[in-house]
Amino acid sequence: MVSKHPLHRFIFLLFLHVWSSAKDTINNGFSIEVIHRDSPLSPFYNTSTTPFHRFMEAAQRSLARSRSYRSSFASTSSIQSTVYPDIADHLMKFSIGTPPVQVLVVMDTGSDLVWSRCKPCVDCIGRSVPLFDPQQSSTYIELSCDSPQCKALDASACDKRPKCKYTYGYGDGSSTSGVLSTETLTFDTTDGGTFSIHDVAFGCGHNNSISFSDHLYGLAGLGRQSYSLISQLGPYIGGKFSYCFVPFQENTSTSIMSFGDQAVFTGNDVVSTPLLGEDSGTFYYVLLEHISVGGMMLEVPPPKASGIGNMFIDSGTTVTLIDSKIFQQLKQALNGVVKLPPTTDPGKTFLCYNATSRDGFPTITFHFAGNADLVLQPLNAFTEPSPDGLVCLVMLPTDGMPIFGNTVQHNFHVSYDLVGKKVSFKPTQCSNVSN
C-alpha cells in the first residue's frame, strides 16, 4: 500500500546501512539463479502434468492474484500487500545470518516486505522445516519502535514496546507477524561466488497464517517501497535490476536475475519505456498506447490519472490482463488472422484454437510510450499445444488495472532502471544467459 508517512522513504534510505562483502562485486553487479515453481528444479514440480496443464494451473493462481489487486488502489490503515503470498510463479534462494541458513522464498515484484519464518515459529509445529534461529546468529539485531526502518514500514504496526513488532497482511486474509530486524543476507552468484549484504531490514516471522508448504520459508518483496529488497540494495546496485525468464517448455534451465551493472544491456534491438507512478506505492507502472495484430492497430484507453500509467509489470502473474473493451477488439482481430475456428479451454476461460502447434499464429505487438514496440512472438502470446490439440491466447480481459504478466516476458531480458526511471526489453534466448 502507499505509505502514510512519505518522508519515511527518505529517512529510511538516509539511515539504512548496507554494504557488500566484496567491493568489486558492488561495482560490477552480481547475478543469481531463479526457478519457476513448476520447473523440474522446483520442489513443487508435478511429473504427471503437461506444460499446457501447468500453464492452466498457473493461470488460475494468477486470476486469484489479480482479483486481490482490485482493492490495491484504496488506502487502508494497516500494512497490507494485495497479493496472495503463495501464488507467485518464481522462487529464489538466499541465506540469512551468521552462520548462514539458506531459505527458499517467493520472488515478487508485487509486494515489498522481505521476511522469513523464524524460530520460535507458531505455525511450524510438527513440520520438518529447518528454520532460521535468530539466537544462533551473531549478526541478528532487533529493531526498535523508534528506528527509521520501523517507521518506514508503518509506525502504527509497532506495539510501542522496545522491539518493532509488525503484522503484514496479504490479499487472501493471511499474514505474517514477527519482529522487524536487520541481518546479513548472502546470495550464491552465478559465477560460483557469494555476495553478502549486511544490516538488511527484514521481518523475522514467528506467527505466519499463510498456506506455505514446507518448502517455502518466506517472501522477497521486490516492489518500490523503501523496505523492499530492491530499495535496500538500491544505493549499491545503482537502482538497476533485471531478469530473463525461460519459457515453460525450456524449464529445465534456470532463469537469471541480475543486479547493478550486470542488469544493463545494449543493442539495436533494445526498446525502453518510462517507468511511471514512482510515488504510487509498490507497482511498476508503464503506459501502453496501442496493441497491433494482423495490420490492425487497437488504441488503448489512457490512464485515469496522469503520471500513473495504464498497466503495471508483474513478475508473479502468469497471464496478461487487458482492458475488457480492447480485449474484445483483439479477439476479433485474432479471429480474422488465425484461419482456425475459435473455441475455449475446458474451463471456458481462454480464447483457444484447435491446433497441434503454434506455427502460423501471428505476432502481437504492444506499443508502449517512448516508441517502445514490443513484438510478442507466438511463444510469448500463445500456449504450447495441449495433448488434445488446443492452443490458447495467454491474455484475458479485465475491468481492473491491466497487468503485463510473465509469460509474455519469456525470452526477453527485462531491465528496470529506477534512477533513469525506465524499463527496457531485449529479445534474448534466456536459457543461454549465464552472466
Image (tube, rainbow, N blue to C red):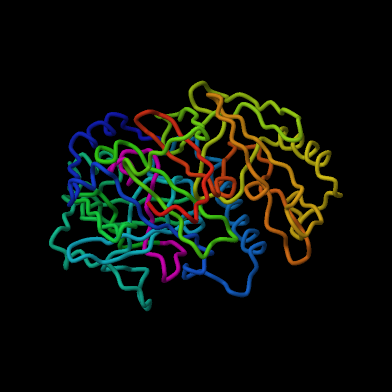
Name the image quarter holding residue 397. Answer: top right
Q: Which residues are magenta?
A: 209-233
Q: Outermost residue toward the top?
A: 306
Q: Residue at x 66, y 35 (%)?
A: 323
Q: Position of residue 113 (x, y in %)?
A: 35, 48
Q: Nearer the viewer, residue 205 or 373?
A: 373
Q: Outermost residue toward the left?
A: 138
Q: Is residue 76 left or right of residue 39?
A: left
Q: Nearer the viewer, residue 206 or 262?
A: 262
Q: Nearer the viewer, residue 39 or 328?
A: 39
Q: Residue at x 45, y 69 (%)?
A: 213
Q: Position of residue 180 (x, y in %)?
A: 25, 51
Is residue 214 located in the magenta-colored stretch of the structure? yes
Number of numbered discs on residues? 0
Q: Residue at x 22, y 54 (%)?
A: 196
Q: Position of residue 356 (x, y in %)?
A: 77, 60
Q: Position of residue 414 (x, y in %)?
A: 47, 42
Quadrant assignment for the N terminus: top left
Is residue 253 located in the magenta-colored stretch of the structure? no
Query: What is the magenta segment's predominant secondary structure?
Result: loop
Name the image quarter holding residue 131. Answer: bottom left
Q: Nearer the viewer, residue 210 or 416?
A: 416
Q: Is residue 36 left or right of residue 54?
A: left
